[in-house]
Amino acid sequence: MRAQAAVHFEGSSELQIREIEVAEPGPGTVLVKLGASGVCGSDRHVLDGDWQLPSPTVMGHEGAGEVVAIGEGVIDVEPGDHVILSWFYPCRRCTACLSGRAFVCTGSRSEECLLPDGTTPLALDGEPVYPYLTAGTMSEYAVVPESAAIKVPKEVPYDVASLIGCSIATGVGTVVNDAEVDAGESAVVVGAGGVGLSIIMGLQLVGANPIIAVDLNEDKLAAARELGATHTIVPGPDLAAQVAEITRGGAEYAFEAIGRVQTIESLPGLIAPGGTAVIVGLPPADAPVSFDALALAETGKRLLGTNYGSTVPGRDFPKLAALYLAGRLPVDKLISERIQLSEVNEAFDAMRRGERARSVIVF
Ligand code: APR
Ligand code: ZN
């Protein structure tokens, strides 16, 4: 099987559209024909050299499509099913998986961009090429472990489904699974890109109030208001004072959704005593942050890290899809542009300029 794919070569921040070879699905894996792939900030980190990966890499990790073939022993899905791909495939055998905490699975090889048997299903001119996070969704076809392909109703359009696979799962999961925000509690979200706007959707879903969005870009703030933000702020020299004014002394929850050291360090100052600060944005590797530990301890503030919104894909994707179909999660409003695979570099440039909530590649 041959497929057009967006390939990253180490040292270059431009993707190349190349024809790759995709293997038949082996035992426990499925072949998916992609319908859509989101363009996420995490892909950008790789392009900009923030994180090290095996190279070359087929980029993209936020995708949805149709199962077209299954390997030996696959029982969860069958050809014709519509699936959302998870960029973290649980091994389903380690202690974390068995205790329902698949998001901290220790048996997965997704971060190595490998299938469970240690191979890659993709090749370029006869040489191995690696699917980013074993998803590689910026390609017409992908082969993924069956635990990474979650069946959802066919009524969910592919563009919406693709976003459920990363930004929505991360954003809503952070609110629901990690912070456990309740109705009437106050929250501030720093960064209103795809992930930040998804957090705002999650906050709106659980009835948080007020919901404060912070971003440098006015268009992002307008999108935030449409998705449920009650207040929007362009950060000035004293963001903490701006937040304190709206919340009378600090928010109960603060989320960082950019991945910048400085904004992460600003989080504890945005919350009231007893409040919770959540690091959602992923900074470059080896970028330590520092806090006044005494002030944090004395005020009983909590600091949480979260990866993927502590999502259990098989449990959470169908729920998020159902909430979309019920009109309670307006995922489609996150899509600012639908593009062709060949336009992917422009989408990353727009992201670097802070433009567009989410660009979605449609196949
Ligand atoms: N203050 C406020 N907002 C800022 C600042 C700043 N100093 N710098 C950037 N922003 C805003 C941008 O304007 C943009 O709207 O942060 C937003 C970042 O959004 P995206 O680039 O679209 O990134 P996104 O896909 O949302 O991912 C954010 O989460 O999953 C991680 O790896 C991902 O680290 C990345 C983060
Ligand atoms: Zn992502």
Image: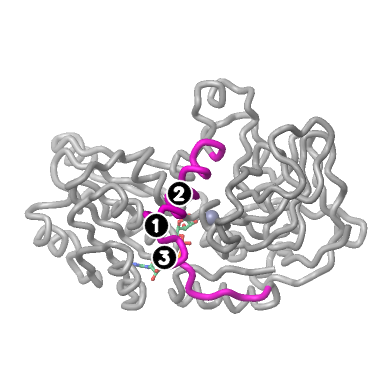
Residue 64 sits inside the magenta stretch = no
Can you give x and y, in whole percent of width and height, for residue 155 in the image?
57, 56
Distance, label 2 to label 3, CA atoms, is 12 Å
Q: Nearer the viewer, residue 287 or 276?
A: 276
Mark 2 and mark 1: Cα distance apart in space = 19 Å
Residue 281 located left or right of residue 122: left
Label 2 vs 3, first from the N-terminus: 2
Q: Position of residue 245 (x, y in %)?
A: 9, 61
Earlier along the polypeptide chain: callout 3 or callout 1? 3
Residue drawn where x is 80% and y is 55% of the image = 129
Residue under numbered circle 3: 193
**Residue bearing mark 2:** 170
- Looking at mark 2, is its residue's CB closer than 8 Å to ligand 1? yes
- Mark in the foreground, 2 or 1: 1
* Labelled pair 2, 3 in contact (Cβ < 8 Å): no
Q: Looking at the image, is 70 positioned above or below residue 217?
A: above
Q: The disc labelled 2 sits on which kind of residue?
A: Thr
Instruction: Tell me: residue 66, above or below residue 216.
Output: above
Residue at 66%, 75% (x, y): give it: 340
Q: Secondary structure at mark 1?
A: loop
Screen quadrant of the C terminus: bottom right
Q: Say which amino acid is labelled 3.
A: Gly
Distance from Cα at disc 3 to Cα at disc 1 = 22 Å
Q: Residues within 10 Å of mark 2 (few under 14, many from 20)?
A: many
Question: Magenta residues?
Answer: 313-340
Q: Visible in this render: residue 50?
A: no
Query: Does mark 3's beta carbon lie closer than 8 Å to ligand 1?
Result: yes
